[in-house]
Image (tube, rainbow, N blue to C red):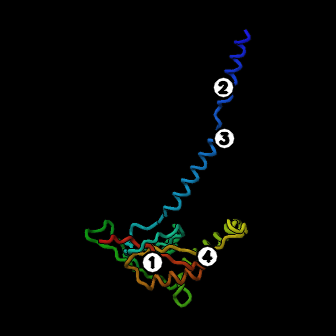
Amino acid sequence: MRSSIKNRRRRHRIKRDFDLQLTSMMDMLIIMVVFLLKSYATNSVAFATSSNIKLPSSTAEEIPADSINLVVEPTGIMFDNEKVMDFANLPVIPSPAPAGFTFTPTYEIESRHLADYGRRILPLYDAMVKSRQKAELMMSKAVVVDPTTGERSTPKFQGVVIIHADKSVKFDILRKIMYTAGSAEFKIFKLVAEKKEEA
C-alpha cells in the first residue's frame, strides 16, 4: 500500500518537473523575429520608381538608404507617393493610341507654379515643407540614447531626398527641383540610377 502511494507521488513529481517553460521559449522566439526583421530592414530598400521612366545607368556600388522618394514622371512630379503637380502643354494621347505612337514629355512648368525668379516649384515646396514639419514633430517626441556616454538627445531632421528622374530630363528641371528641396530644408540629394553591368 505504502509503495503504491510512493510510486504515485514520484510519478506526479516527475510530471511537474518536466512542464514546458513557455515564457522563456516565447522570449527566444521574439528575439529571433526581431533579429530577422532588423537584418531584413537593413538589406532592403523600397523604391517607388515609376514604370514610365528610364533611369540613367551607373557603375556606383552604393545602395542609398530608405528615405522620401521624389519621382519626376513624364506627366508630372510625385513626392512621397503623392502627385503634387502636372507638367504643362502635355501632348494629347489619342484613344486608342495608333501603332508607333510615342508620348513625348514636355517637362514644362506653368509660371504660376514658380517663384524666386522661376527657381522654386511652389506645389513641390508646399508638399516638402509639410513632410519636413511632420518628420520634425515625430522626432521631437523621440529620444535617442548614446550607447557610449548614455547621453539622451532628440534626433535631428536629416533632410535626405531620393530623386528618380528619367535620363531625358533636362538639367534645368533637376536644378529647380534641387533648389526647391533646399528651400524646404532637404539638403541631401541622392539620384537613383540603374546599375550598369560591367562587361
- Residue reaching furthest to the front: 3
- Can you tell which mark lies on residue 129? 4
- Residue reaching furthest to the left: 99
Q: Looking at the image, is mark 2 or mark 1 nearer the viewer? A: 2
Vertical comparison of 59 with 142: above or below? below
- For marks 3 and 2, the one nearer the N-term is 2
Q: Looking at the image, is mark 4 or mark 2 nearer the viewer? A: 2
Which of 188 and 33 lies nearest the eye of the viewer? 33
- Can you tell which mark lies on residue 103? none
- For marks 4 and 3, the one nearer the N-term is 3
Label 3 sits on a secondary structure element that is: helix
User: What is the x, y in percent for residue 198?
Assistant: 32, 71
CA separation, marks 2 and 1?
A: 75 Å
Q: Looking at the image, is mark 1 or mark 4 nearer the viewer? A: 4
CA separation, marks 1 and 4?
A: 21 Å
Tag 1: amino acid? Phe
Q: Please state, as top left, top right, bottom left or bottom right, where the C terminus lies in the image.
A: bottom left
Identify the residue under disc 3: 23
Vertical comparison of 110 with 65: above or below? below
Identify the residue under disc 2: 15
Which of 165 and 140 lies nearest the eye of the viewer? 140
- Label 1, residues with CA under 10 Å away: few <14, some 14-19, many ≥20: some
Label 4 sits on a secondary structure element that is: helix
CA separation, marks 1 and 3?
A: 59 Å
CA separation, marks 4 and 2?
A: 65 Å
- Can you tell which mark lies on residue 87? 1
- For marks 2 and 1, the one nearer the N-term is 2
Q: Is residue 100 visible?
A: yes
